[in-house]
Structures are given as structure tokens and as C-alpha cells.
Image (cartoon, helix red, strand yellow):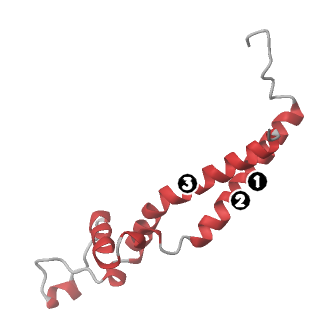
Amino acid sequence: MLSESWVDFIAGWCSGGAAVITCQPVDTILTRLQAGATILKIQPAAATAATATNNPTILQPRQIFRTLISTAGVTSLWRGSSAMITAVPLQNALLMSGYGAGKRWSGGDNRNDDDGG
């Protein structure tokens, strides 16, 4: 059986990996939203060339999502996430290990309290 420190480390690693995998698509869409229409080359459907240059388009996250999926596929939502997939699980693992060790050291991990409190 694993020691409590290793259990904390593995739990932190798994939670960090799950967080990156689930949140990266939202982060990608928000980054594209901040970058503006030039990165996606989105033009409004009813706009002409003259009005598109004089009237900036306000992008919606739904437009960005549909454009990313249609032009680059589903995997484009996780493009550029390799650094995050490497760093965040390790960060969470160390954080959870440190938290668990500190809690055990301070005596705050009293699982066998008989007084019910």
C-alpha cells in the first residue's frame, strides 16, 4: 500500500491533468477572442469589403469555436497545451503533497477522533 504522501502526490497529479484537459478548450477560445478577428479571418456574413475594414467585428465565443472546429478540427482546441500538460500536474502534485505533509505535521489530520468533533 502507498504511503499517504504518495497518495497526495498522485491525487494532485491526476487533478492537475484533469484540470488542464478540461479547461484548455475554454482557454484557447478566450485567447483567440482576445487576439481578435485577424487571427481567424472571420468576416460578418452581411458585410462587404468596404464596411468590414471600417466597422470592426465583435467576435462571439461561439463563432470562434465553430471556426476552430471547421478549419482545424477538434484537436485545435488543445493546440499549444503541451507546456500546461507538463507543468500544471506537477505543480498540483507538489501542492497537494505539501498540504498533506503540513496537515499531518501540525496534527490537523485526526481521522480517528472518538469524540465526534
Q: Nearer the viewer, residue 54 or 75?
A: 75
Residue 35 placement: quadrant: bottom left
**Residue at position x 29%, y 84% in the image:** 41
**Residue at position x 22%, y 88% in the image:** 53
Real-space Cα separation, disc 2 to disc 3, in angstroms: 12 Å
Is 82 positioned to the left or the right of 58 in the image?
Answer: right
Residue receiving disc 2:
90
The reply to whether discs 2 and 1 touch (Cβ–Cβ < 8 Å) is: yes
The reply to whether discs 2 and 3 touch (Cβ–Cβ < 8 Å) is: no
Q: Residue furthest front?
A: 1
Residue 33 against residue 109 in the figure, above or below: below
Disc 2 marks a residue whose amino acid type is Leu
Question: Which quadrant is the C terminus positioned in?
Answer: top right
Residue receiving disc 1:
94
Neighbour class for label 2 at 10 Å: few (<14), some, many (≥20)?
Answer: some
Residue 87 against residue 17 in the figure, above or below: below
Real-space Cα separation, disc 1 to disc 3, in angstroms: 15 Å
Q: Nearer the viewer, residue 74 or 54?
A: 74
Q: Position of residue 36 (x, y in %)?
A: 36, 77
Disc 3 marks a residue whose amino acid type is Ala
Badge 2 marks a residue whose secondary structure is: helix
Disc 1 marks a residue whose amino acid type is Leu
Residue receiving disc 3:
19
